[in-house]
Image (spheres, rainbow, N blue to C red):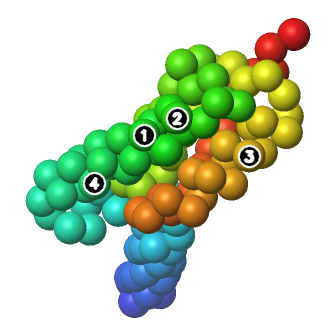
Amino acid sequence: MKQCKTLKLALVMSMGFAFVSMGASAETSWYSEINSKGNNTGHYLSDTSISNKIKNTLLPMQDIDSSNISIRTEFGHVFLSGFVDSKAQEEKILQIIEKIEGVKSVDSDVNIKS
């Protein structure tokens, strides 16, 4: 009887460890990149240069008012917020940003001016 309880306890504990390890390995968020390198200073500088490249690319474009757009880059993932004149303008901005070196993805939360 004692062996049966020990066996059940061992089985339950191994299942618990399996579920915990599955949960840990299922992490697919890009936030996991934060800990993958150890020193993240390079990411910060890259993010700053990506944001600057985006701003410098959009600034001279006469058909885009980039002063109403906020750009934030985290580990190569670009986040946009602010205002644009039209959906077509938003799509054009997204296409431009996606072509910039170092950009992994773009998340747009811009609003259309009314």
Which of the two discs, 3 and 4, labels the residue nearer the N terminus?
A: 4
The C terminus: image quadrant: top right
Which of the two discs, 1 and 4, labels the residue nearer the N terminus?
A: 4
Give the alpha-carbon distance from disc 2 to disc 3, as whole Å. Answer: 14 Å
Give the alpha-carbon distance from disc 1 to disc 2, as whole Å. Answer: 7 Å
Which of the two discs, 2 and 3, labels the residue nearer the N terminus?
A: 2
83 or 55, which lies in front?
A: 55
**Residue sitting at 48 percent across and 52 percent down?**
77
Residue 83 in view, yes or no: yes
- The residue under label 4 is 46
- The residue under label 2 is 60
Q: Which mark is residue 56?
A: 1
9 or 104, which lies in front?
A: 104
User: What amino acid is found at the position of numbered circle 4 in the picture?
Assistant: Ser
User: What amino acid is found at the position of numbered circle 3 in the picture?
Assistant: Lys
Question: Is residue 86 shown above or below 96?
Answer: above
Label 3: state its secondary structure: helix
Mark 3 vs 1: CB contact within 8 A? no
| Image x and y of residue 34, in percent | 29, 56
**Residue sitting at 67 percent across and 43 percent down?**
93
Mark 1 vs 4: CB contact within 8 A? no
